[in-house]
Image (tube, rainbow, N blue to C red):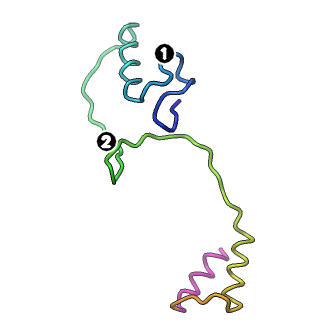
Amino acid sequence: VMNKDATMNAACGERYVGLDRFDARNKLWSDMEGAGLVIKAEPHTQRVPRSQRGGEIIEPLVSKQWFVKTEGMGAKALEAVKGGDITIVPQRFEKVWYGWLTD
């Protein structure tokens, strides 16, 4: 229901399309009060996730997931170390390298 710029999309209904997320919440609450759908309002403390850098509120956003097929790339990287084309420094981390690429 939310676009990547935090405005509401068409799934919200005509009354809320294009509104900022905060404006949409306020309008929705007002509309619910106007329609007699609010039973009661009481203060509630809730943790709101915020960005570490700027402190902006982080909204959950459903998006498509994507994955990369790494078998071919991993096999080439494995062979490059085995063949001596790439050297892992310090050498004790070769075991970690092989573990990452073979598990």
User: Of the residues shown, which amino acid type is indicated by label 2?
Assistant: Arg
Say which residue label 1 marks. 15
| Secondary structure, magenta segment, majority class | helix
Q: Nearer the viewer, residue 56 or 67?
A: 56
Query: Where 31 sits versus 99, above or below?
Result: above
Query: Where 46 sits versus 34, above or below?
Result: below
Query: Where 31 sits versus 83, above or below?
Result: above
Q: Within 10 angstroms of label 1, few (less than 14), some, or many (20 or more) residues? A: few
Q: CA distance from mark 1 to mark 2?
A: 29 Å
Q: Residue at x 73, y 77 (%)?
A: 75
Q: Residue at x 41, y 23 (%)?
A: 24
Residue 48, percent across and down? 33, 41
Magenta stretch: includes residue 94: yes
In which quadrant of the rendered image does the C terminus lie? bottom right
Q: Within 10 angstroms of label 2, few (less than 14), some, or many (20 or more) residues? A: few
Say which residue label 2 marks. 47
Q: Residue at x 27, y 31 (%)?
A: 44
User: Of the residues shown, which amino acid type is indicated by label 1?
Assistant: Arg
Labels 1 and 2: the sequence-earlier one:
1
Residue 26, percent across and down? 35, 21
Magenta stretch: includes residue 4: no
